[in-house]
Image (cartoon, rainbow, N blue to C red):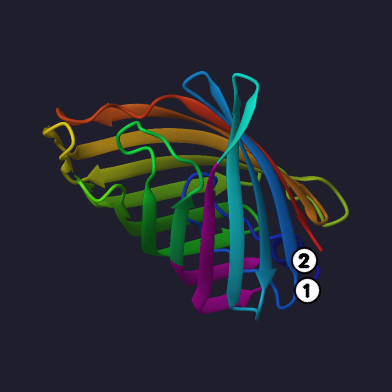
Amino acid sequence: MGIFAATSAFAHEPIYGLGPETLPKHMHAIELGVMYNLGEFEYEVGYAYGITQNWTVRVDASATNRSSSFDVRSVTLRTKYALWRKTAPGVLKRLTAIAIVKFPTRSSIEPLANISAATVGIANGYESRRWYYFSDIGYTYSWADPNDRLGSKMSYNLAGGIRPIKSGYLKPDLVILIEINGELSGKTTLDSTNEVLKGGNTLAMAPGFLLSYRNIMLKGGIQFGIANTKYINKVSSNGLLSLEYHF
């Protein structure tokens, strides 16, 4: 039990992927984060609750502060259910189903600015005292104004990590991650402008870290595009930092 304590006390998951983590029964989690992308800061606050050991629900709200105006962009509802879990001394394996619904909270005349989206996916994870492995795949269907037809998206992510120092629960614990993030997008049609945006595939790489102390975790990462097909832009470089608290 002592060997497993550092793993079970604060489960880990990738920064940019879906992630398989579910909270213990009746546990709460609060997360505050900031992302920098295309010269703009986006802020996010999230709250999660463990209904059972295998079932977690969460709500997130994102906002920006541009031109001295605070703009709440979207609200996201998500649920996770652990389909399979196996534990052993120093090892945790999981397979989790995920459903997400995202609603816009602002109005804009720009094409595709007011997007709602629904995502279903599945994620698995392997955590040990030294090594980490995560993978996930998700399908997203989006809709905007009645005259716009958005292409669906298939995301796929692969992440590996290592704990450089096998620290105990009463000491700071650092995990280094490297992620590969891919997204296959379908064709989008804008009827209002008779414009057709062809889809394609993108690949991005994201090194990051998870630094936890007891029930507090600091997470950070930098994502940059490494490949793209002809009709879609490469992922723009971005960075994020967040603080998560379990109680």
What residue is at 73 percent from the left and 55 percent from the top?
Answer: 30
Give the amino acid at mark 1. Met
Q: Is residue 20 left or right of residue 58?
A: left
> In which quadrant will I find the N terminus?
bottom right
Q: For residue 12, what is the image quadrant?
A: bottom right
Numbered disc 1: secondary structure? loop
Q: Main secondary structure of the magenta part?
A: strand
Q: Residues within 10 Å of mark 1 (few under 14, many from 20)?
A: few
Q: Is residue 73 left or right of residue 188?
A: right
Numbered disc 2: secondary structure? helix
Give the amino acid at mark 2. Ala
> In which quadrant will I find the C terminus?
bottom right
Q: For residue 15, what is the image quadrant?
A: top right
What residue is at 27 percent from the left and 29 percent from the top?
Answer: 227
User: Which sits in the foreground, 236 or 223?
Assistant: 236
Q: Residues within 10 Å of mark 2 (few under 14, many from 20)?
A: some
**What x and y, as percent, mark residue 234?**
30, 27
Which residue bears the numbered disc 2? 5
User: Which sits in the foreground, 102 or 209?
Assistant: 102
Compared to 165, does 118 lie above or below? below
Compared to 85, does 106 lie above or below? above
**What x and y, as percent, mark residue 29?**
72, 60
Magenta stretch contains residue 138: no
Query: Magenta segment, which residues?
Result: 73-98
- Residue 130 in view in this figure: yes
What residue is at 81 percent from the left and 45 percent from the top?
Answer: 172
Which residue bears the numbered disc 1? 1
Q: For residue 237, what is the image quadrant?
A: top left
